[in-house]
Amino acid sequence: MPDQSISEARIPLDEGSPLDDGTARQGISRRRLLGTAGATGLVLGAAGGGVGYAARPAEATPLTSVGAGRIEFHVKHQPGITTPLQARGHLVAFDLTAGAGRKEATALLRRWSETARRLMAGEPATQDDTDVATDAGPSSLTVTFGFGHGFFARTGLEKQRPVALDPLPEFSSDRLDQARSNGDLWVQIGANDALVAFHALRALQKDAGGAARVRWQMNGFNRSPGATAHPMTARNLMGQVDGTRNPKPGEPDFDQRIYVPEDGEPDWMANGSYVVVRRIRMLLDDWEKLSVAAQEGVIGRRKSDGAPLSGGAETTEMELEKTDAEGGLVVPINAHARISRPDQNGGAAMLRRPFSYHDGIDADGVPDAGLLFVCWQADPLRGFVPVQRKLDRGDALSPFIRHEASGLFAVPGGAAEGGYVGQALLEG
């Protein structure tokens, strides 16, 4: 897979494609919406101890391009794979409940698909909508569904389970919490507005009903669209430019690397992909003790602009054999960007599309923060696994990260009009 700062296999980031266009719509005045509630807010604010001003209703403004962004649900490949990184995200795994099988799973995927279609269009959920996202635009919402290894036994579909879904090998850097790993079903939610993302999360959790229960949930974020006047490859929580050499949809071999072909095996995975999900803790206190020069040596790229230590700009090809005045390699032999390059891993590549996370301070008083690593490939045994094995044997970044949860899911192609995700599997 192409080299990049922290993102190869361990710590990845976005592909940097432009936002989808959306049609701007006029927003509704919060003054009209709240009516006399504004006065009540003033009273409550004063009663709070007089330490600040009461919240003032926002002025009426047109819906911005961020809120108006709309992504289609019925597409060839499920949304949320090549969609530009969104500002907010939720990753959720579900287990089918006792007694739930193929029939219940089929009904659930029908409900989920219809709810996802409606919410991605900016419409309310089918029933019992919570109104959390009332008056918000779609905000580039995407919902993506996948199946875990255990799903097939629970539904009597073992013969349809892909070989590519075999459990990942163990790695020496793994410190995996099994309670936050794997799962029968996986859902990825992304949006450029936190309330829109949460609204989708609650709607899908309610839709699960008695068929499935949440196994684990992880919440993440990225830079908000428009937060910088100089759009560039994003940074991760280590401050590194992250995602420079991510595969791009326009490249000739992109589909071959990322998607299962239409004539691939099994046939229900046509136009689908396999996703590896990992919660990677960044040991930020240790990392931030390093000088900038030492951090750059660990990664193999300049922190300021993401350019390789061998010179040039961010996208300049790295010169692996370039030496300094003393004859030492300019890009250290164990630098993350060197080790994770495709030409160092038999051409292995994947599309990284993660979220950062921060879950507060742990019992030891250190930040529980890092990356929700999400990578896509046509076959994880040819994408993620070779790169991770190479990193496991001598990556300079290893002392500063910890893999704490892991999952592998088969993500089928997009749902046809009037259909639902996974229909070819469940009705085939």
Image: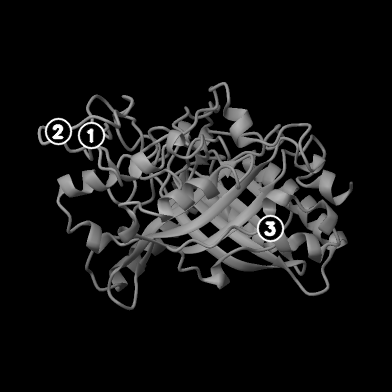
Marker disc for residue 309: 1
Q: Name the residue under label 3.
A: 148
Most extreme residue toward the left is: 325
Instruction: Please rate how many residues cluster around mark 1, counting C-alpha atoms within 10 Å: few if below 14, some from 14 to 19, many from 20.
Output: many
In this view of the protein, can residue 245 be seen by the observer?
Answer: yes
Q: In the displayed structure, would residue 242 be above or below residue 10?
A: above
How many marks overall?
3
Residue 427: x and y in percent read: 89, 48
Residue 20: x and y in percent read: 53, 28
Amino acid carrying label 1: it is: Leu
Q: In the figure, residue 117 lies in which quadrant?
A: top right
Instruction: Please rate how many residues cluster around mark 3, counting C-alpha atoms within 10 Å: few if below 14, some from 14 to 19, many from 20.
Output: many
Q: In the figure, residue 127 lies in which quadrant?
A: bottom right
Q: In the figure, residue 225 lies in which quadrant?
A: top left
Between the C-alphas of marks 2 and 1, the distance is 11 Å
Q: Which residue: 58% across, 25% down?
A: 253
Q: Mark 2 points at which residue?
A: 324
Most extreme residue toward the front is: 327
Amino acid carrying label 3: it is: Gly
Which sits earlier in the primary sequence, circle 2 or circle 1?
1
Residue 352: x and y in percent read: 49, 42
